[in-house]
Image (cartoon, rainbow, N blue to C red):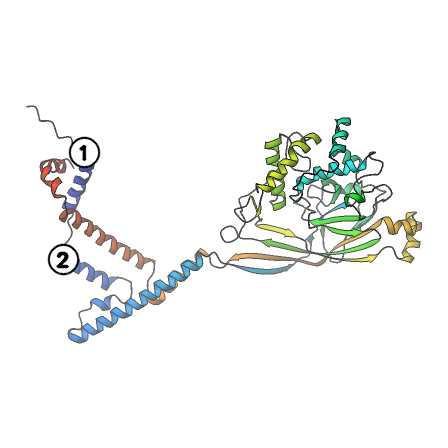
């Protein structure tokens, strides 16, 4: 016999019928059973004080008073416990930090890198119009700073005429050939911890000062370490003012050596961090080793996951260089040789027409920002600095001039106008570490919460699980009551047979 077609029941109705069928088989207990369950929970739980609210040993007025007093006590201490827990949770999410300073004395300490530059950039016989060379170099070196936000207007026509005549002119090759050079005639004396050093021990680098030379660069064959304070690197340089000169009308009025002391793993940064030694002076640089450790966000401002493509160690200065390099390459299709990266080198025409306006746009739109965690280049999580105390004395003295004039074959007047003597040494053989620490860790938060709950309520994690089980049980009973006692009447009258069939299907 052919069975009649089953009614087409909507999915939602089928779901609620299944719920109804399950709850019907697992109905909520009666009032007496619920009271018994609550009483058993109160006398058996590890939450202290609850059993005093349901004890039946005392009857009459004294029993009611006792239970009332215990109720007040339990309520007061529960309220106190949760207020203490709330204070500690708020304290944790305020991301507070503390700073500790430790000093560790060692037998040997890493010697930093030192980059030397001449304050004069080019030889006088380099080009006929030297102001054009200065103008071009200022245009090129602007990629290292945000300060040159305006496009220069002076000497523009001279530069255009110069580029038309010298179409294959390379400012990079020109600077390396005619800029400051380091050889036996400019490095008159070099001594590192009693061991002679030579021009070959210095690595050539380009900075805003043109040709510069770094001692103890990280890529060197052997890394320098010292074992005694008061000794280090000692150099005697000849700046050769007769050969190298800058145009005073362009603001270059100093003669001497500028140098920066930095970590061997990061590039030298001269902007605001360089030290100066004028000609005819002996500079005594006493350095200290300072390491700063910053917490990651949200406690601090650093991002431990940031890495640089062309620098081994993350630094804000290296990050800014790579950031500007990426933007300029994307916009101009070339790379300034002062910035890290791989790609076609920008010529002077590209510098003037594209690179310089791109730098201005990067500055105004803050495409490469530095500082906080939300910046393009936040502060590093670990940074090494070398705070320096610099003092000077006149070099050479009258007696030394007589001795050195014979040894160096130079008269006293020449030495006072051209020689620069620099000593760089450690003040003490120790590391000073400044560490930003979490004032309240997650483990301390859990310990504090557990301590407060245990002190005022005698509660633990087991107690919390017991309370959760108790609440979930009552929640299930409440759901069962609502489903069984508060049905939708209209749907029940229209679909009683349909739900009956659906219950059988379940």
| Residue 136, image x, y percentages | 74, 36
Quadrant location of the N terminus in the rendered image: top left
Q: Residue at x 9, y 36 (%)?
A: 497
Find disc 2 in the rendering and name its residue. Answer: 31
**Taking 460 as reference, is 5 above or below it?**
above
Q: Nearer the viewer, residue 334 or 412?
A: 334
Q: Quadrant of the C terminus?
A: top left
For the point 16% across and 40% down, which residue is it?
17
**Sequence order check: which comes first, mark 2 or mark 1?**
1
Question: Is 197 drawn above or below residue 37 in the view shown?
Answer: above
The crowd level at tag 1 (other Cα within 10 Å; few <14, some 14-19, many 20+) is: few
| Residue projecting furthest to the bottom | 62
Crowd tier of the residue under label 2, counting other residues whose Cα lies within 10 Å: few below 14, some 14–19, many 20 or above: few
Q: Which residue is mark 1?
A: 10
**Would residue 332 appear left or right of 130 to someone viewing this image?**
left
Q: Position of residue 47 (x, y in %)?
A: 29, 63
Q: Position of residue 163 (x, y in %)?
A: 75, 29
Q: CA distance from mark 2 to mark 1?
A: 36 Å
- Evaluate whether residue 457 shows in this view: no
Q: Are marks 2 and 1 in contact (CB under 8 Å)?
A: no
Mark 1 element type: loop
Q: Is residue 252 above or below residue 436?
A: above
445 sits left or right of 241 in the view? left
Q: Secondary structure at mark 2?
A: helix
* Quarter where residue 425 is shown: bottom right
Q: Please say whether residue 252 is visible from this viewpoint.
A: yes
Residue 324: where, in percent of width, then height? 61, 38
Q: Nearer the viewer, residue 451 or 166?
A: 166
């Amino acid at each position: 016999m052919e069975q009649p077609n089953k009614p087409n029941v909507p999915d939602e109705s089928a779901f609620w019928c299944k719920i109804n069928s399950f709850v019907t088989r697992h109905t909520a207990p009666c009032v007496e059973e619920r009271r018994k369950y609550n009483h058993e929970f109160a006398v058996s739980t590890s939450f202290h004080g609850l059993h005093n609210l349901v004890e039946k040993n005392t009857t009459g007025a004294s029993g009611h008073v006792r239970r009332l007093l215990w109720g007040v006590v339990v309520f007061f201490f529960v309220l106190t416990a949760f207020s203490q827990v709330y204070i500690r949770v708020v304290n944790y999410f305020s991301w507070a930090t503390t700073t500790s300073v430790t000093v560790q004395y060692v037998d040997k300490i890493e010697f930093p890198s030192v980059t030397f530059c001449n304050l004069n950039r080019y030889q006088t016989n380099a080009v006929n119009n030297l102001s054009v060379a200065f103008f071009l170099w200022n245009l090129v070196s602007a990629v290292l700073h945000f300060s040159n936000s305006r496009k220069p207007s002076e000497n523009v026509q001279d530069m255009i005429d110069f580029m038309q005549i010298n179409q294959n002119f390379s400012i990079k090759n020109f600077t390396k050939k005619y800029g400051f050079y380091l050889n036996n005639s400019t490095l008159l004396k070099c001594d590192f911890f009693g061991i002679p050093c030579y021009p070959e021990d210095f690595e050539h680098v380009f900075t805003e000062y043109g040709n510069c030379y770094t001692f103890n660069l990280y890529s060197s064959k052997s890394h320098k370490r010292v074992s005694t304070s008061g000794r280090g690197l000692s150099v005697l340089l000849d700046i050769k003012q007769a050969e190298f000169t800058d145009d005073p009308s362009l603001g270059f009025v100093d003669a001497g050596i500028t140098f920066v002391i930095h970590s061997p793993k990061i590039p030298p940064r001269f902007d605001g961090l360089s030290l100066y030694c004028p000609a005819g002076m002996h500079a005594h640089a006493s350095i200290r080793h300072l390491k700063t450790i910053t917490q990651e966000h949200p406690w601090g401002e650093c991002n431990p996951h940031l890495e640089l493509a062309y620098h081994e160690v993350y630094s804000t200065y290296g990050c800014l260089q790579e950031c500007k390099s990426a933007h300029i390459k994307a916009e101009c299709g070339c790379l300034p040789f002062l910035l890290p990266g791989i790609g076609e080198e920008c010529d002077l025409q590209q510098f003037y027409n594209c690179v310089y306006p791109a730098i201005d746009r990067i500055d105004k739109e803050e495409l490469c920002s530095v500082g906080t965690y939300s910046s393009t280049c936040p502060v590093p999580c670990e940074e090494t600095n070398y705070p320096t105390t610099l003092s000077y004395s006149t070099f050479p003295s009258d007696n030394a001039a007589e001795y050195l004039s014979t040894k160096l074959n130079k008269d006293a007047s020449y030495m006072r106008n051209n020689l620069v003597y620099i000593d760089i040494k450690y003040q003490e053989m120790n590391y000073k570490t400044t560490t930003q620490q979490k004032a309240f860790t997650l483990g301390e938060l859990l310990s504090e919460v557990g301590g407060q709950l245990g002190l005022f309520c005698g509660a633990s994690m087991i107690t919390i699980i017991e309370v959760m089980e108790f609440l979930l049980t009552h929640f299930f009973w409440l759901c069962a009551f609502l489903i069984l006692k508060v049905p939708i009447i209209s749907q029940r009258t229209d679909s009683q047979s349909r739900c009956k069939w659906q219950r059988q299907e379940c």
